[in-house]
Amino acid sequence: MDPLFQVDLSFVFEQPSIWRTLVQTLILITPLAIALSGYATWRIGDRRGLLLIAAVALYTLWMIWPQPLVPELVLPGRVVSVIGWFWLVSAWGRQAKWHEPFLLAANSIVVTFMITLILTTGVALLRDLMGYDLPL
């Protein structure tokens, strides 16, 4: 039983590697950074920050759900995971503000994770396509 079942990227990468693990970790950490941004937004008086925190909590619960899905629900579960992740990122983008120091720091963390995720995914895909990664 894999506790991170919904985060399994075996449909993207052919073999397990450290890069695949990094991508999975960044996929899980990015919503937590978005929750920090939601907290910063709430602290300046915008109630949308609390909604963003609640959405992150729900998504994180889904991503680390300890029970494996029945085989018929694996593909729909992955679709829900991907759509939910992109929805969180777009919700963060709609409410991101930069006029306070705490907001600047919190949103900069999210942007840093997003850039790191893009670069890490690119490296992982290239290494996988070229056959450089050995199985762990």
Image (tube, rainbow, N blue to C red):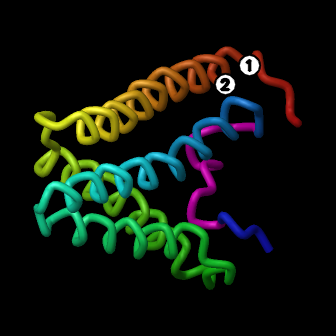
Q: Mark 2 falls on what kind of element?
A: helix
Q: Residue 56 location in percent, x, y?
A: 38, 65
Nearest the viewer among 104 and 62 is 104
Nearest the viewer among 13 and 111 is 111
Q: In the figure, is residue 40 to the left or right of 27?
A: left
Count of numbered badges drawn on the protein: 2
Q: Residue 36 location in percent, x, y?
A: 37, 52
Q: In the figure, is residue 10 to the left or right of 35?
A: right
Which residue is under mark 1? 131
Q: Residue 1 location in percent, x, y?
A: 80, 74
Q: Residue at x 75, y 32 (%)?
A: 18
1 and 2 marks in contact (CB < 8 Å): yes
User: Which portion, as a residue range, is magenta?
Assistant: 5-15
Q: Which residue is drawn at 55% across and 72% down?
A: 74
| Amino acid on which disc 2 is placed | Asp
| Amino acid on which disc 1 is placed | Gly
In magenta segment, residue 13: yes
Q: Which residue is drawn at 55% across and 81% down?
A: 72
